[in-house]
Image: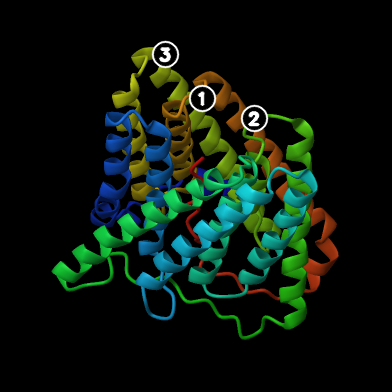
Amino acid sequence: MLRRLMHGTLAFDWTRVQPRPAALCMPAVAVPLALGVALGQPRLGMMVAAGGFSVGFGSFQELRGSRRLPMLGAAAGMCLSSWIGTILGGSPTAAVVLAGIWGAAYGAAWSESPGVSWIALQCTIWLLISTAFPAHGLAALTRGACVAGGGLLQMAVVWTTWAIRGTTGHEGGPAPAVDHAHTTTRQRLWHAVHASTILVLSMALGRMTHLANSYWIPMTAAIVTRPELRLTVERGVARTAGTLAGAAIATAAAFLLHPLPWLLALLVVIFAAAAYLLLYVNYAAFAASLTAYVVFLLTLAGAPERAVIARRALCTVLGAGLAWLGHVLFAGVERTANFVPSDGRPPPDGADVS
């Protein structure tokens, strides 16, 4: 187990790096940020860029033989989840209930194709993010609209380029198929109960801590939790190590550069590009790039950088711990389940953006 953990955290598979697809996704991140800073509206630029960043990962997925469907499904689901989370997030009880419902849907999606599982993850994470920023009226519609706008911009850029090139794929080839022939209705039900329970516990813990950005606890738990203990532990260790490394990188950059808004926007773009590039190369490195991206994105929106870094590290450790706890609670069920995972590559997180 230790050797596998070390390999999963430290091994880099550079044959899976995909520079052209990564570059293709960057305009939908860079342009909204640049416009937001230029117009004095960095928060709006941040939300649009975040939506585009998340949907961009859909170009690496496949659903029913199409690479357009994952992007379209994610954009629509993220927008709807953001609206619901924003409107109902002011109630702690409603937030916990919503986390349980979305968690159940995500757990049930484990038994479906990687594309379906990825879309469910995006919807879950954007729901969790939005419950932390409740609003009503026109303000409640802003986040979802910005997320949808970023997603539409990303789709316009990617699909137009695909049409010009006469292709809808990338050099990495299609997403691996998963054999679900032996996944029973009972196993799907327990997957749903498993994920829902973890999301309820982690959301409740996040609400009780009263920390800013405490939604990172259930978000990490959702991202780390997998049908098998081995996969959850591997992903949790890599996620935690990568988050701590990304926090260190962001701290060093802040100390050395004292970045102004334009430089912050540039750092966001750099680390977003790194996340796309390292997606399948090494999960810990991907998580490090994602952490630095999030820190600089929130700093651009006005959050205190050092506090963001510390909370990010703490919430990641707590969320990963709760994900592992889930396998203790459901150990008996998992021993009798015969879920067949994919080739070991987790679906990209994508929506871990705020």
**Do residues under tags 3 and 2 come within 8 Å of each other at their CB atoms?**
no
Mark 3–mark 1 distance (CA, rounded to whole Å): 16 Å
Q: For numbered disc 3, what is the local secondary structure? A: helix
Which label was assigned to residue 212? 2
Indicate which disc, 2 or 1, sits on the residue closer to the N terminus.
Answer: 2
- Pick whichever of labels 3 and 1 is earlier in the sequence: 3
Task: Give amino acid for label 2.
Answer: Ala
Compare residues 41 and 10 and report the one nearer the observer.
41
26 lies left or right of 207: left
Using the image as rendered, state which of residue 250 and residue 91 is in the foreground. 91
Neighbour class for label 3 at 10 Å: few (<14), some, many (≥20)?
few
For label 1, the residue is 303
Q: Kindly report which numbered mark, 3 or 1, lies closer to the viewer in this rendering.
A: 1
Tell me if residue 89 comes above or below residue 20 in the rendering: above
Q: Mark 2: which secondary structure?
A: loop
Residue at 47 percent of width and 37 percent of height = 288
* Residue shown at the point (36%, 42%) measured from the top left: 272
| Residue 52 numbered mark, or none | none
The residue to which callout 3 is attached is 255
Horizontally, is 167 left or right of 312 in the view? left
Give the residue at the far left of this rendering.
164
Q: In the rendered structure, are the residues bearing label 3 and label 1 in contact, judged by CB atoms less than 8 Å apart?
A: no
Q: Position of residue 204 (x, y in %)?
A: 78, 44
Q: Is residue 224 visible?
A: no
Q: Amino acid at mark 3?
A: Phe
User: At which x and y percent is residue 221?
Assistant: 67, 48
Of residues 194 and 336, the one nearer the viewer is 194
Inspect this view and state whether residue 239 appears.
yes
